[in-house]
Amino acid sequence: MSAQPESGYRGRIAPSPTGFLHLGHARTFWTAQMRARECGGTLVLRIEDLDRERCRPEFCAAIVEDLRWCGFAWQEGPDMGGNFAPYRQSERSYLDAWEILRARGFIYPCTCSRRDVRAALGAPHEQRGAVIFDDEPMYPGTCRPALGTIADAATPAGVNWRFRVPDGERLSFFDERLAEQRATAGVDFGDFVIWRRDNIPAYQLAVVADDAAMRITEVVRGEDLLTSTFRQLLIYRALGLTPPRWFHCPLVLDEKGERLAKRNDALSLRTLRERGATPEAIREGWI
């Protein structure tokens, strides 16, 4: 393992092995790497592989290979270890965080599926072209208990668990690129899932737990996750944790003006490499 930088800055890149990395991932990750380097800090590679149905071993291997080829270098990760291992979410435990939130009354069990929520709202999910935007729909409160209710459960398995947002509370955070960001809980977003009925922690809880445990000081990611930041700030507060700084990057769009998805195979690093593109050509204009 390489020597650790002396700076207290700790950034991370956190791909999911559900497909090959595309240009959008690479550009956002490159920003994360450059900010870590400019601060003389540490860059962490974390593999977010909690989705057992979609994550595949071949994509895990491709992540490391493609990032190395593109010019990335990290100081901690699943391929080299570090002081905050393991660096694969599938090897970490999130039950302590769930139990704290349950015992403090911040979460409640919910039997509603995503389809149930959309049906209750009376509107289909947002769709542009062939891309479904997977932001969590506003929850109508079907299973929401009375304020102050603490669910009695020894395990989270079998139902969804939702975080109860403080309705009407105005939230804000400073983004290092976009400046002050504001949202109102219960208006701009509603109660959200932190644990899935198939006994897998949801994205919102897992990234908070991991970033806190790995002492990440700044999160660099795409601006499509701005609303998720407000959700995560509520989790940080509920767990008594200090949140990192935030930097949300502009999205890379395709020829139709849509954000890139892993279905855009023509713009994956793997395909571009096979077609003879060089890392230097791919990174041109990124800095």
Image (cartoon, rainbow, N blue to C red):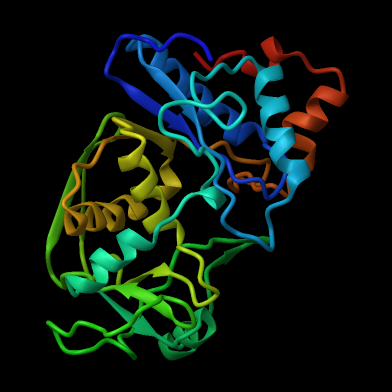
Q: Residue at x 73, y 50 (%)?
A: 56
Point out residue 88 in the picture as x, y percentages from the top left corner: 55, 43
Q: As drawn, which residue projects farthest toward the right?
A: 275
Point out residue 116 in the picture as x, y percentages from the top left corner: 49, 88
Q: Nearer the viewer, residue 52 or 174?
A: 52
Q: Residue at x 50, y 77 (%)?
A: 197
Residue 205 falls in image quadrant: bottom left
Point out residue 283 in the picture as x, y percentages from the top left corner: 62, 16
Q: Nearer the viewer, residue 208 or 245?
A: 208
The answer to whether 104 is drawn above or below residue 74 in the figure is below
The answer to whether 113 is drawn above or below residue 32 in the figure is below
Q: Residue at x 72, y 26 (%)?
A: 65
Residue 115 falls in image quadrant: bottom right
The answer to whether residue 226 is left or right of residue 240 is: right
Q: Residue at x 40, y 76 (%)?
A: 155
Point out residue 43 in the picture as x, y percentages from the top left corner: 44, 22
Count of all numbered marks drawn on residues in the image: 0
The answer to whether residue 276 is left or right of residue 236 is: right
